[in-house]
Image (cartoon, rainbow, N blue to C red):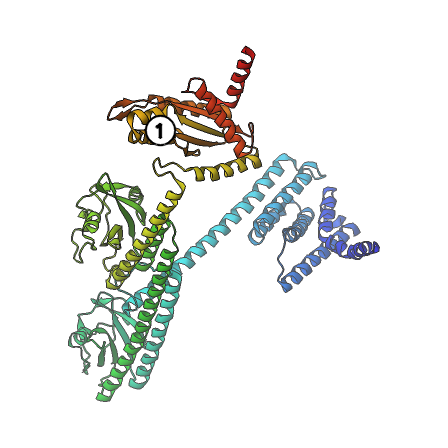
Amino acid sequence: MSSHPALSAVLKLPRLAVRAVPIGAVLATFVHLARGGFRSLHTLGWDEAGLVLFLLAGLGVIGWRRFTRDAVGAPLFLQDDLELGAVFLASAYIVVAIAGGELFPLVYLLMACLVAFLPHRASLALVAVALAFDALLTLGGPARGGLSSFLTHTLFLSLFAVLNHLVLAARIAAARRAENAAVDKRIKEVEERARTFRLVNAGAHDSPPDEKDQEKWLVASVKEIEGAVGAALEIAETALKTNTCAAFLLTSDDKGLKLYDCRSASDHVQRERFNAGEGVLGGVLKRRAPVRMHSAHGLKGITWYDGSAPTVGAVLAVPIIEGGGLVRGVLVADRLTHNPFSDDDEKLFTTIAAEVLRSIEVERVMSYIRKTRDEKDRFFRAIEELNRAGSPEQVFLAVLESARQLAGLDFSAVTIVSEVEGKRVHKVARMLGVSAAGKALEGRTFPDNNGLVANVVRYGAPLPGRDLKAMDRQVIFDEESQIRGLAALKIFPLTAGDRILGTLVAGSRRKTALDHDVLRMLEVIAIQAAQAVLRAQLYEQMERMATTDGMTGLYNNRTFQAKADEMLAHSRRYGRKCSLVLTDVDHFKSVNDTYGHLTGDQVLKGVARILKQQARDTDIVARYGGEEFAILMPETDAKGAKVIAERIREAIKAEVFQTEMGPLKVTLSLGIATAPDHGLDKLVLVEQADQCLYYAKRHGRNQSVTVAEAQGGRKLQAAEG
């Protein structure tokens, strides 16, 4: 078994030898050049001939490797590119050595080509190789050219490499920009033609969320119509023997005509938009009926040619009319000779016009079906997202994203209403699609007022009405919060049963964005959002009730135990400090007996508030039981815990509680234990902190005591005893 690896290594030797041919040839050539070889044609010998053959063999190996890799689709490595570039460099230096330094620019040109065709890393490495070898030749070789020669070569090699790379990068970037501009231009042309065909809303300029799919669909639809129109025009040209047979469609504003397609022997057909109310075509649009004209001396009112228009002897123009009587364009045919069009020609051309219209209407129906399908898909996805949302924040984000996708909104917000001291207060919970100034509104609260949001909550109905005037002067939230630039706005109440939880604000810069179908979907989204917000709020309320103390709002004992387990596990795993502080209100029983339990509850609430204020954000503050409280302090040693405990004690001592029997002041005793110094088991740590608290109580109260201080005090008492 041990002979197999050795045999495998022996079999690989020929392959490795062949693989090393390019590098060996380059190194041998550079060494020979450094020793003064290849100085002229007259001094060439068998050594030089052998090196040239060696380089050619290396080039053959490189070519074969690249061919076989390309045949199987294998990628090329950096080494392959370096070997190829190095062989060309060695060959260039041989030519320069034989012909003289006047041909050194050949190296510059070669380097520019290598930078252009090889990857960036390989070209940089080859520049470094060329500079190193040039330094060897000019500074240390037989043909010492001196430092100035080396610096000159270095400068020009770097310039040729860098400039060629920059020029190439600039040309690639310019080509990409030109390609993107051409694509954008084509998309705009397609969108304009789609608006002309009424495949999309004439006022819609914003792309829907699935922009790429929409573009593909528009291109396919427009091509389908183009094919149908082109085929119809070819039939008309052949059957009617026309000079020009063209389709002109009304632009999206119905005020102009623009050539859509034509079959003409003339190069002067008007390709720019022109007035739809002028000439023969204007008369056809006004009359909504076919027009036939002929004259031996040439007709007037021919607007579909530019300034070099030919003399037209006969014209047949047919309007393209939809079923509802709307005119969409004109088909026109003309002849240069005085050969009038017949009744049969008019019937044929009218049929062709109807076929053109039919192709447009088919695509328009398909557009409506696709739009309806996509809207339903987005609507159902929005409902699913709302049903999956758990927390109020997730609900807010889901409803805003859903509204944006359904209506293409430029601005949307969710507000929540609550009561504070019997007064209604509104809060902007989340916003999307606003400017940097508008972003500051997120989280803003404002009192009940005469703004639209407050009125929607007050009356429980969507606002404003359909005919909204002076949009910029409308107060949406409050006087200080203005959202400008909106052309359409609707605010929906978030209603759950008989409760109004807030509002959904939807706005757009496009006046036609909030049509009847979109408003209906947004109304349903608002209803679903209200139910989702209510569920999330109830869940948070239940979770809060399960984890917090009802009177003080701090964590309850059960949550404290779970948090302590997590924190001590982290301390055991990473060896980090963790402190526990147990506190007790001094003489609390006498407070209850003297002032009553209501005052006692007021004191406990005040103590809990101060504990929460004075503790750090990372600390866990809990009601431990009765008048006892506990504080878990992660990443805190005994010294740090003592500082925080003293800060809390001083704050409690300075607080004055106003009661019916006069002002009341209380003090606090605190016991401090630290893990792992005083134990890593929760029960042990609690016991240590409790003993320190007991020590503080027995020795005067209104103090904080660490384990070290308690142990030191007990030792001192034992010594004195």
**Residue 398 x %, y %:** 36, 53
Question: Residue, x 55% and y 34% (percent of image)?
Answer: 681
Q: Name the residue beneath numbered marker 1.
A: 607
Question: Residue, x 32% and y 50% (percent of image)?
Answer: 433
Q: Quadrant of the C terminus?
A: top right
Question: Residue, x 18% and y 52% (percent of image)?
Answer: 459
Q: Nearer the viewer, residue 511 or 354?
A: 511
Residue sitting farthest toward the front: 593
Q: Quadrant of residue 379?
A: bottom left
**Residue 653 x %, y %:** 35, 21
Residue sitting farthest toward the top: 720
Count the labels in the image.
1
For the question of whether residue 308 can be seen, the reply is no
Q: Considering only vertical position in the picture, is 657 above or below 266? A: above
Q: Secondary structure at mark 1?
A: helix
**Residue 463 x %, y %:** 20, 54
| Left or right: 33 as drawn, with respect to 625 | right
Q: Quadrant of residue 127?
A: top right
Q: Nearer the viewer, residue 447 or 566?
A: 566
Q: Considering only vertical position in the picture, is 135 above or below 2? A: above
Q: Considering only vertical position in the picture, is 37 above or below 14? A: above
For the question of whether residue 15 can be seen, the reply is yes
Q: Quadrant of residue 218?
A: bottom left
Neighbor class of circle 1 (other Cα within 10 Å; few <14, some 14-19, many 20+) is many
| Left or right: 90 as drawn, with respect to 17 | left
Q: Quadrant of the N terminus?
A: bottom right
Three-letter code for the amino acid on which mark 1 is drawn: Val
Q: Nearer the viewer, residue 355 or 689?
A: 689
**Residue 189 x %, y %:** 33, 64
Q: Nearer the viewer, residue 622 or 530?
A: 622
| Left or right: 126 as drawn, with respect to 561 | right
